Amino acid sequence: MEYGPCGGVEFDGTCEVADHACVFVNAATVTWRGIAPALREPPRMMADPVPDPVPSAGGEAMRELIATRPIVIADFPARALDPDSLRDCARTLRGHVDVVLAGDSGTARVQFPPAYRASLIQAEGLAAWMGVNARDRNRVALEAELAALAHAGAAGVHSVTGDHTRIGSRPDAAPVFDLDSTEIAALAKRAGHLVSVAEAPLSPPTGQRPARLLQKQHAGADICFVNHAGGVEPVREFIASARALDVSVGYIPCVPIIVDRGSAELIRGFTSLALPEGYLDGILAADDPREAGIAAAAELSARFLELEGVVGVDLSGGAGPGQELSFAEALAEIADRIGVAA
């Protein structure tokens, strides 16, 4: 990693996959200076010229929408490698949310490639904002994937370093990490995308998170998804600190979606998770946890949308096993109650 730390630093400052302190926690913020070469040697042959990048039509449309009103984006809950689940969830969410965020599956590392998934989702009339990680691809594969996503008309590209393979379902796979999220943001911008990154306000070093976002903006980020940070006030404070440094990106806070014990268990697995006090326990203790979770998410979303600089909310979380379609239905209901999506 060149532009660390990632969002997975534990609250005590340790690495999420190793028993030692994150090496970036006590270091100065790394200034953006471009994509670092893996090897400092000239190429032995020159590639044929490639066409100039064509901006993603979906990204242009999403920029125009964000300029007119807040958006509602939902984490896409479909089962990995299951086209029927993908189509069913897309059809359920179409007309309720503005776009879905389709990144890493919470339970499976192997998925259809992002550009193919984007094509399948958008074939159902639903815009797709696609996550692209550095864990599984080197820079050549990333450049190809980003070109394919532009051709597919993805609504946006969410640039993430990626959870380490050791904390997922495939610890047997060697992680790549040729680049990191900041460098992917630069590649995505160059490829013609609307580019988003994530920041974790409560993950150490908390004092450097706004400055780190500024470097991601220099690299090419347009939008910041604000990871679960404990409620409205921590997000307000983070945005104010970032804007004081001349960070001008739009902000999309993540709203925790909990409608049953399966979705609660999944969200508990998020690294450096911070929820509003009593949020999860209150939902699970309710007579009707599904209704309580839907109401709580809609109310929290409305409060986030009042914050200066916020351009939308992300209905964030995932389904328990076999509950993907039911979870999509809950997301659609929450979006309807928020009342800003088309």
Image (tube, helix red, strand yellow):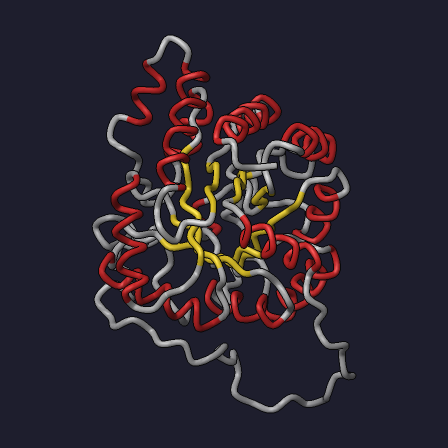
User: Looking at this view, is 172 or 268 the one in front?
Assistant: 268
User: Looking at this view, is 60 or 195 the one in front?
Assistant: 60
Please, is residue 268 above or below residue 15 in the view?
above
Query: Where the N terminus falls, by quadrant?
Result: bottom left
The reply to whether residue 174 is visible in this rendering is no
Q: Is residue 318 left or right of residue 151?
A: left
Identify the residue at horizontal 43%, vertical 61% (top origin). 249
The reply to whether residue 247 is visible in this rendering is yes
Identify the residue at horizontal 35%, vertical 76% (top origin). 31
Please, is residue 192 above or below residue 99 in the view?
below
Q: Is residue 2 left or right of residue 90?
A: left
Q: Residue furthest front?
A: 68
Residue 258, horizontal then vertical, whole percent:
42, 26
Please, is residue 113 above or below residue 257 in the view?
below
Q: Residue furthest top?
A: 287
Residue 310, horizontal then vertical, whole percent:
41, 49
Identify the residue at horizontal 31%, vertical 27% (top origin). 279
Query: Where the C terminus falls, by quadrant?
Result: top right
Specify the quadrant of the image occupied by residue 102: top right
Identify the residue at horizontal 37%, vertical 33% (top origin). 300
Q: Is residue 168 left or right of residue 282?
A: right
Residue 188, horizontal then vertical, whole percent:
58, 66
- The number of discs equals 0
